[in-house]
Amino acid sequence: MHDFCFTIPYGILLIVGGFIGYLKKGSIASLAGGAGTGLLVVLAGFISLKAFEKKKTSLLATLLETVIAAALTFVMGQRFLQTQKIMPAALVAGISALMTCFYVYKIATGGNHIPPKAE
């Protein structure tokens, strides 16, 4: 599975979550945090997708995805420990932890594998 297959939906989920936090609570922090990190993740996924289309891998995009997911895991995990609220802290921390593991796996296995050319 290629990283962008999960990265772009993950980024969209973060963006939507930020907007929901803003609409429900009027939280500018949710909007900025969710939309900001979500846009960065979608951008990294798009860079990875474009590299894959050119039959290349993008280590930079995968590293950016990993750093963002790990940071969200830490920050939202800390927030969950403080508030004990499942939504959104534990949910975002859990999904981000899974994504971090996936990205570390992708880095360890050499990134997106390019299929051989059909002759």
Image (cartoon, rainbow, N blue to C red):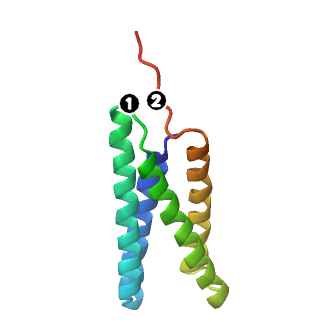
Instruction: Answer with left or right where residue 104 lies relative to residue 39.
Output: right
Q: Where on the picture, by quarter, is residue 18?
A: bottom left
Q: Which residue is disc 1 drawn over?
A: 55
* Badge 1 vs badge 2, beta-carbon distance below 8 Å: yes
Q: Which residue is disc 2 drawn over?
A: 114
Residue 55's x, y, as percent?
38, 30
What numbered label is drawn on residue 102?
Answer: none
Q: CA–CA distance between discs 1 and 2?
A: 6 Å
Q: Is residue 21 above or below residue 60?
A: below
Residue shown at 48%/65% (left/top)?
68
Q: Where on the picture, by quarter, is residue 25?
A: bottom left
Residue 37's x, y, as percent?
40, 69
Q: Amino acid at mark 2?
A: Ile
Q: Amino acid at mark 1?
A: Lys
Q: Is residue 20 above or below residue 109?
A: below
Q: Secondary structure at mark 1?
A: loop
Label 2 crowd bin: few (<14), some (14–19), many (20+), radius 10 Å: few
Residue sitting farthest toward the top: 119
Residue shown at 40%/77% (left/top)?
33
Residue shown at 38%/54% (left/top)?
44
Residue 11's x, y, as percent?
42, 61
